[in-house]
Amino acid sequence: MSMARTLWDDRGVTSFIQASEATVVVPPGIALPLSITGSLPVGDADVGALGPSEIVEAKFRLEYSEALGRYEIASFGLDRGAAATEITGVLWRTVRVHSIVRTAIELGLPSWAQAIARARFRRRDGVLRNPPEFSPSDPDGLLLAALAYRVAEITGENPALAVAETLGLKQRTATNWITRSREAGYLTSTEHEAAARRIARDLGDRMPLGDRPRTEEEEIVFRALMVETMRSRSELEARWRRTTDGND
């Protein structure tokens, strides 16, 4: 069994990411699907050999590894669809596989946890409104450090860099925060979901979805959604025309 995940509620529903109903809860209290399957429309930002207006479809299956603490790519392929470019070895060398599947993993996170990744990139790019400030002994700051660490680990990124960018710290200082967070139990216990949701909600309030500018990462997800929306609309219109023609 699987369930479709939403992107962000006020932008509509995506139908191209399927997260398994079977989950595993990881510290500090994030419920992750054991597998994620689906497809995403991607352009030249993630496949360098494509032309500016060309779109291909990436199809994949990801499986969570408790031993590694992240998702592994179980399968990955490309379908050129209506694009004129042939899928060759030369094209494959320009595919940013990690960037594509990272988008899928972020969409597979619980909706409240997606705010953690978004806040990181917005703060890094200087577009997070009134970013929160914490002292090294602040429990909320240490929990946020743990959340940033785990989301980055889950998506296959540098956890220490993620903590630094989320909290506005130097990377060396972020390492000290990670140590404190671990000592406080935030990286070893799964009992902190309620507090984690509260922190994520506060971050979400600091970055309304209609705000501009978006970060590069948000733009990639947004473009994927827009392409999927247009494709779904075209398919609905084609079915309507076939039905209408059949009734004439």
Image: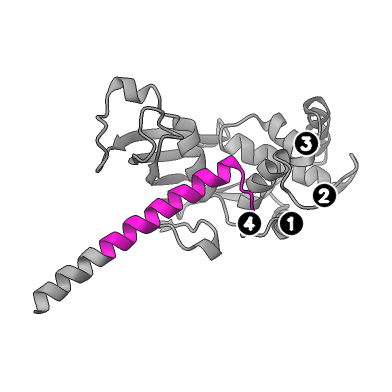
Dot in front, 1 or 4: 1
Q: Is residue 226 magenta?
A: yes
Would residue 189 be seen by someone viewing this image from the given angle? yes
Alpha carbon separation for disc pair 1 and 2: 9 Å
As displayed, is residue 69 above or below residue 186?
A: above
Element under label 1? loop
User: Residue at left 62%, top 49%?
Assistant: 30
Q: Earlier in the sequence, mark 3 or mark 1?
A: 3
Nearer the camera: disc 2 or disc 3: 2
Kindly indicate whether the residue at mark 3 contacts the one at mark 2 (C-beta within 8 angstroms): no
Q: Residue 200, located in which quarter of the rendered image?
A: bottom right
Residue occupied by mark 1: 206
Q: Which residues are magenta?
A: 211-236
Instruction: Look at the numbered discs 1 and 2 and tell me whether their residues touch, using CB distance below 8 Å.
Output: yes
Of the two numbered discs 2 and 3 on the same chain, state the one appearing first in sequence.
2
Crowd class of label 2 (few under 14; some 14 to 19; many from 20; radius 10 Å): some
Residue that mark 4 sits on: 112
Q: Position of residue 27 (x, y in %)?
A: 67, 44
Q: Secondary structure at mark 2?
A: loop
- SS type, badge 4: loop
Residue topped by disc 2: 132
